[in-house]
């Protein structure tokens, strides 16, 4: 053992330190060989693996992958699709924990955009592709739905990358995540499909949305051929209930690309945002929606010792060294005044701002007509209704129609052919106005209390 290869382990004893020289690499090599031999020799798994790979018992090579729980559903789904498309010759079996006997393959029903599907979570695949490369792939669930993946192979013929690289390419270009909508926890989103007719937009808003999002996605090749940026940042601003979330829902329904939905609660650790942008780039064209960004990149940096915990990472993802090729970021906020200037005052981060203000008189009448179109009602006296609802959002107007219909249905013994009357709409509008006035009073009182304490 050379001095360069040796290390010293020190044990403290009552009579002094005891130094024991050792070679870490040699010890690790010995332990790996011992573990490998103990596990594989004289087991059905070891014998069948060696026979399949064409090597002597115990001479196969192994490498391990770790699939984290939130990524497992999409990886398992894509693994099944990939194996069936690329490996004509394969066998699926399973073994007990020691590998001494065969056992049943274990499957689990997982959620996907098209519904639940049963996928293998514990089993062993014997795979051979058209080029004659052979792999033994063993899936073993650990601590919930985390999956340990063991790849057994003959290193004289191939390497694990010969399997993993094409599989991950399939996962990112043809897999279940491509053109799907999911959140930062990798859960597929379930939402109502919306059409552009379901959202009331001004002509100016619609032009901005088309130019920077929908038409931009459809015409990316034109920008690429002229070496122009293939990323956009759109900040959607407005009070609660004015249609920001509905806009994002409509874009998800009407635009063919990958959607990743992020909230401040789901990205609490450093690296979470970077991971989502890495995924968005690999699954591009993609749209990342950041809901209520003011809770992520909030105002005063001094409050956080010079930086918001996640602000620097988010800024770097928006306009850092890594180009967001074919990635659009849409961020919504109720409080643009709380945003750090580094977020909003630089093109390349947020290039466009779309304002969703409270609806004016004309727009309130349009919104009421939209929600009343499928309800039998008498001729509406809009002049009074519009006056009562001044300062209300589209969500408030929708709730007024909902409350009026519910009470009218009840008063008419749930006869669906009843005619909704003006006075009932006025009554519910007045109730909404009063409730909002009470809320505003209590909110102002609470704010005054906090200022004096």
Image: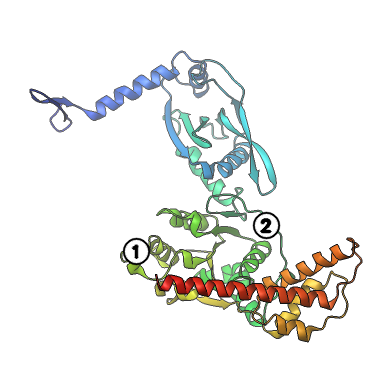
Q: Secondary structure at mark 1?
A: helix
Q: Determine if residue 309 is in view.
A: yes
Residue 246 lies, with reference to residue 98, above or below; the image says below
Q: How many marks?
A: 2
Q: Are the two marked residues, 1 and 2, in contact with CB atoms closer than 8 angstroms?
A: no
Residue at 39% across, 22% down: 36
Residue 337 lies, with reference to residue 182, above or below; the image says below
Residue at 35% across, 66% down: 303
Q: Secondary structure at mark 2?
A: loop
> Tell me, what colour scheme is on the image?
rainbow
Quadrant for the N terminus, please: top left
Residue at 49% across, 43% down: 165
Quadrant in which residue 309 is drawn? bottom left
Graded by Cα atoms within 10 Å as few (under 14), some (14 to 19) or many (20 or more), the crowding at tag 1 reads few
Tell me the number on the disc at residue 304: 1
The residue at which mark 2 appears reads as 191
Distance between mark 1 and mark 2 Cα atoms: 36 Å
Graded by Cα atoms within 10 Å as few (under 14), some (14 to 19) or many (20 or more), the crowding at tag 2 reads few
Residue in front for this viewpoint, 402 or 290: 402
Residue 414 location (% of width, % of height): 88, 60
């Amino acid at each position: 053992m050379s001095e360069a290869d040796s290390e010293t382990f020190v044990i403290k004893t009552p009579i002094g330190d005891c130094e024991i020289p050792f070679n870490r690499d040699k010890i690790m090599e010995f332990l790996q060989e011992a573990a490998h031999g103990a596990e594989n020799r004289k087991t059905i798994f070891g014998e069948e693996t060696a026979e399949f790979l064409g090597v002597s018992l115990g001479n196969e090579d192994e490498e391990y992958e770790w699939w984290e729980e939130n990524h497992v559903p999409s990886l398992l789904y894509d693994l099944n699709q990939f194996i069936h498309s690329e490996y004509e010759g394969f066998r699926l079996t399973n073994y007990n924990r020691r590998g001494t006997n065969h056992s049943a393959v274990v499957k689990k029903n997982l959620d996907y955009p098209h519904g639940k599907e049963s996928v293998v979570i514990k089993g062993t695949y014997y795979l051979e592709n058209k080029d004659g490369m052979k792999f033994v792939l063993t899936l073993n669930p650990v601590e919930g739905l985390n999956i340990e993946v063991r790849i057994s192979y003959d290193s004289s013929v191939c390497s694990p990358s010969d399997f993993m690289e094409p599989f991950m390419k399939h996962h990112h270009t043809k897999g279940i995540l491509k053109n799907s909508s999911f959140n930062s926890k990798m859960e597929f989103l379930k939402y109502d499909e919306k059409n552009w007719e379901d959202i009331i937009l001004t002509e100016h808003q619609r032009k901005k949305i088309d130019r920077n999002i929908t038409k931009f996605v459809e015409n990316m090749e034109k920008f690429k051929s002229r070496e122009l940026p293939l990323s956009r940042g759109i900040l959607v601003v407005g009070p609660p209930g004015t249609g920001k979330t509905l806009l994002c829902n409509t874009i998800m329904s009407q635009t063919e690309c990958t959607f990743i939905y992020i909230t401040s609660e789901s990205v609490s650790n450093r690296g979470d945002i970077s991971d989502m942008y890495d995924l968005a780039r690999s699954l591009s064209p993609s749209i990342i929606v950041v809901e209520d960004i003011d809770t992520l990149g909030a105002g005063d940096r001094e409050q956080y010792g010079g930086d918001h915990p996640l602000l620097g990472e988010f800024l770097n993802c928006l306009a850092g060294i890594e180009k967001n090729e074919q990635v659009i970021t849409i961020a919504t906020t109720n409080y643009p005044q709380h945003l750090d200037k580094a977020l909003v005052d630089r093109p390349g981060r947020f290039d466009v701002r779309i304002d969703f203000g409270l609806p004016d008189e004309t727009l309130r009448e349009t919104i009421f007509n939209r929600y009343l179109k499928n309800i039998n009602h008498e001729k509406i006296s809009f002049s009074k209704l519009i006056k009562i609802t001044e300062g209300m959002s589209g969500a408030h107007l929708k709730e007024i129609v909902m409350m009026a219909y519910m009470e009218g249905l009840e008063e008419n013994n749930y006869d669906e052919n009843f005619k909704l009357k003006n006075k009932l709409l006025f009554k519910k509008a007045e109730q909404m106005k009063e409730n909002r006035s009470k809320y505003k009073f209590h909110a102002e009182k609470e704010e005054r209390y906090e200022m004096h304490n």
